[in-house]
Amino acid sequence: MPGLLIRDLPDDLHQKLKERAARNRRSLTKETLVILETALKDTSAVQNNEPPAPYKGHFQLTDEWIDQARREGRQ
């Protein structure tokens, strides 16, 4: 089975991992595997390349609304 070595792991991240492993009664290795497995689960359902359906409701686009959106940083 392949191994993984993580170099230069920040101390605070290591401490959080240790605490999480202890809470879950796992070793650091097992806790890391659980985190990786969760993060890398099958995401094919999420990766849908189809565009969303067009908006079919009514929306009044006013200058005031556009100005507010620009002030909020929306483009």
Image: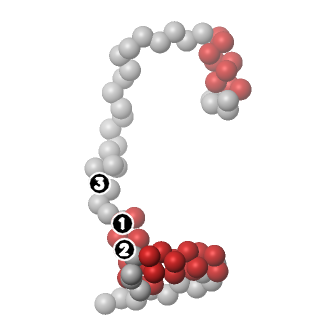
- Residue 64 location, x and y as percent? 66, 12
Is residue 68 positioned above or below 35 on the image?
Answer: above
Q: Is residue 32 visible?
A: no
Determine whether the residue tagged by mark 3 lies in a helix, strand or loop: loop
Question: Percent from the top left, x then y, of residue 11?
Answer: 64, 80
**Circle 2 SS class:** helix
Q: Would you name the residue on which mark 3 appears?
A: 44
Q: Amino acid at mark 2?
A: Val
First-in-chain label (3 vs 2): 2
Query: Does the CB distance between marks 3 and 2 fall below 8 Å?
Result: no
Extreme residue toward the right, this view: 71
Q: Residues at badges 2 and 1 in contact (C-beta under 8 Å)? A: yes
Residue at horizontal 32 percent and vertical 38 percent from the top? 50
- In three-dimensional space, the C-alpha distance between marks 3 and 1, rounded to whole angstroms, equals 14 Å
- Crowding near the residue tagged with mark 1, few <14, some 14–19, many ≥20 C-alpha atoms within 10 Å: few
Q: Which residue is mark 2?
A: 34
Q: Quadrant of residue 27?
A: bottom left
The quadrant holding residue 15 is: bottom right
Between discs 3 and 1, the one toward the N terminus: 1
> To which residue does mark 1 refer?
38
Tell me which residue sits at (71%, 26%) in the image.
Answer: 71
Crowding at mark 2 (Cα within 10 Å: few <14, some 14-19, many 20+)? some
Query: Image point 38% across, 14% down: which residue?
Result: 57
Of the two numbered discs 3 and 1 in the rendering, the one whose residue sits closer to the viewer: 1
Amino acid bearing label 3: Ser
